[in-house]
């Protein structure tokens, strides 16, 4: 193709950044723009990964190099479907890659799921990460909460609920939410995982980390049984759980945590409010049990928001190929489903980039203007990388000593700072 190749990536989370990295390397002359509906880049690294896991969030420095040194444009505050249509992007760019992730918490589809004290893990993790589009206000947990789901997100939620404020030093947790939760913290958590210990999706390192939180007593509802020749991770998980049970909570036990493996919810019960959760044993025919709970958190994965993805119909996120149509691709969670770590999106992006490169000769040959072809009023909305850095600096400036940054809880405020319409860092105060 003679005309410079223009590429639009929708979503600046790990998969969007990784595919831009691969495409930049393979196609150094191409024009690459990463669009995001938020005024900040990095997707779930910023708004999903737990606030007390700053070392995981440090991958942002690597992704930043794309915008700082590799001539990739960031166009934040542009939502596909609101500010511009997918069709418009396709008509102005030779290649469009969807890297928009999956943001809707998957439904459990058990009776009682609609009770008011049933909360979704995605909402909670966004809330404590100060996601600017998440309505604020900490849910009412009561004294005891049942967390349904045995993956790392459920452990993130558990940690959040049983840690004390001082345990969040050097994090970027939303202090207002933390203070609100601190008024009425839970004293018992049941973590319910349908898999056995051997097959559970949790990372043993995440389980071991729980043992370092003071004042918490751990128990397991069933014996810890894993075959001697089980895979290494299964043995490590069993070991981590065994060690958790031996943790001495010290003189003051603030919270009890009970781990249940091989149990799945049948129903959530209560007369207008959550009273208990009925569980069935997944691998044998033991009688169902009822666990008392004041609230329930579901952490069973993520899915598409609605039926139709911007005119593409109802997509399923379990695709072998990244190709959706001529010049249209997808990568990351929107392709594979809500499984896998940040790093796993790298190999996914590399495979999709190879598909794109293999298809180059079949693309429309006429020139396409890329970002410059967007209507002026849409480009006027954009928060570019320099503008995002203004927000980044203001957040760091506004942080107290014990925090790495203080995120702005309002999207409008972020955009105003980015566009230099609100410069005082004190504006980071909630409510300004
Ligand atoms: C709560 C939670 C905690 C996690 N913790 C860890 C962890 O500690 N370590 C780890 O390795 N992995 C962790 N993960 C997994 C990791 O975050 C994912 O593997 C990764 O973020 C998926 O990348 P993605 O780019 O596909 O999606 P996302 O990160 O979700 O990025 C999608 C981006 O697309 C944007 N977007 C969406 N719709 C539009 C639209 N219409 N127009 C424009 N932009 C749009 C979004 O704003 C977002 O920035 C966690 C996941 C969750 C949910």
Image (cartoon, rainbow, N blue to C red):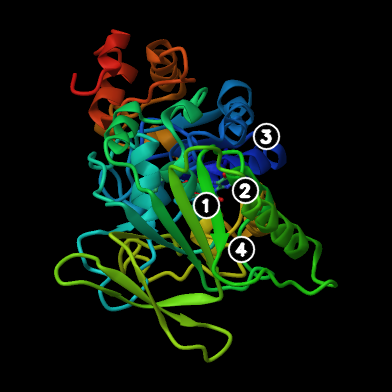
The mark closer to the camera, 1 or 4, is: 1
Provide the secondary structure element on which disc 3 rests.
loop
* Sequence-earlier tag: 3 or 4: 3
Residue under the image location 39 percent in, 21 percent down: 406
Q: Point out the residue furthest to the left here.
A: 272
Provide the secondary structure element on which disc 4 rests.
loop
Residue under the image location 36 percent in, 57 percent down: 145
Q: Quadrant of residue 195?
A: bottom right
Residue 157 in percent (x, y) is at 45, 49
Q: Which residue is mark 2?
A: 206
The answer to whether the residue labelled 2 contacts the one labelled 3, judged by CB atoms less than 8 Å apart, is no
* Sequence-earlier tag: 4 or 2: 4
| Residue 232 in the image: above or below residue 4 | below
* Sequence-earlier tag: 2 or 3: 3
Indicate which disc residue 201 carries.
4
Residue 92 in percent (x, y) is at 41, 45
The answer to whether the residue labelled 1 contacts the one labelled 3, judged by CB atoms less than 8 Å apart, is no
Residue 348 in percent (x, y) is at 65, 55
The mark closer to the camera, 2 or 3, is: 2
Q: Point out the residue furthest to the top here.
A: 424
Q: Which residue is mark 1?
A: 155
Neighbour tally class for label 4: few under 14, some 14-19, many 20 plus, Cα within 10 Å: some
Q: Which residue is mark 3?
A: 28
**What is the distance, in whole Å, between disc 2 and disc 3 at their CAs?**
39 Å
Provide the secondary structure element on which disc 1 rests.
helix
* Sequence-earlier tag: 1 or 4: 1
Provide the secondary structure element on which disc 2 rests.
helix
Q: Quadrant of residue 129?
A: top left
């Amino acid at each position: 193709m003679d005309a410079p190749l223009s590429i639009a990536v929708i979503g600046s989370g790990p998969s969007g950044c990784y595919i831009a990295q691969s495409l930049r390397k393979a196609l150094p002359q191409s024009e690459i723009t990463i669009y995001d509906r938020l005024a900040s880049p990095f997707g779930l690294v910023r708004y999903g990964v737990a606030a007390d896991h700053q070392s995981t969030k440090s991958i942002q420095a690597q992704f930043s190099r794309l915008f700082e040194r590799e001539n990739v444009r960031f166009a934040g505050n542009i939502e596909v479907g609101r500010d511009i249509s997918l069709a418009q992007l396709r008509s102005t760019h030779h290649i469009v890659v969807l890297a928009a992730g999956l943001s809707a918490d998957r439904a459990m589809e058990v009776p009682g799921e609609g009770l008011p004290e049933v909360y979704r893990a995605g909402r909670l993790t966004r809330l404590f990460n100060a996601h600017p589009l998440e309505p604020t206000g900490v849910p009412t947990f009561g004294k005891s909460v049942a967390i349904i789901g045995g993956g790392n997100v459920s452990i993130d939620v558990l940690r959040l609920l049983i840690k004390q404020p001082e345990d969040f030093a050097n994090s970027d947790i939303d202090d207002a939410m933390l203070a609100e939760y601190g008024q009425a913290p839970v004293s018992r958590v049941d973590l319910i995982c349908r898999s056995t210990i051997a097959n559970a999706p949790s990372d043993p390192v995440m389980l071991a980390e729980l043992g370092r939180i003071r004042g918490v007593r751990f128990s397991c509802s069933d014996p810890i049984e894993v075959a001697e020749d089980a895979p290494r991770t299964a043995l490590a998980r069993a070991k981590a759980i065994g060690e958790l049970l031996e943790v001495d909570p010290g003189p003051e036990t603030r919270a009890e945590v009970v781990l249940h493996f091989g149990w799945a919810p049948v129903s959530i019960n209560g007369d207008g409010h959550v009273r208990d959760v009925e569980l069935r044993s997944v691998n044998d025919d033991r009688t169902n049990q009822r666990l008392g709970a004041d609230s329930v958190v579901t952490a069973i994965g993520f899915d598409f928001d609605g039926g139709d993805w911007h005119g593409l119909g109802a997509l399923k996120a379990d695709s072998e190929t990244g190709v959706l149509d001529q010049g249209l691709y997808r990568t990351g969670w929107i392709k594979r489903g809500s499984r896998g770590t940040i790093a796993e999106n790298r190999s996914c992006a590399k495979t999709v980039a190879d598909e794109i490169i293999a298809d180059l000769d079949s693309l429309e040959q006429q020139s396409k203007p890329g970002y410059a072809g967007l209507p002026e009023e849409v480009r006027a909305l954009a928060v570019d990388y320099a503008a995002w850095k203004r927000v980044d600096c203001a957040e760091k400036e506004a942080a107290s000593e014990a925090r790495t940054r203080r995120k702005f809880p309002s999207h409008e405020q972020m955009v105003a700072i980015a566009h230099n319409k609100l410069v005082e860092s004190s504006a980071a105060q909630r409510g300004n």
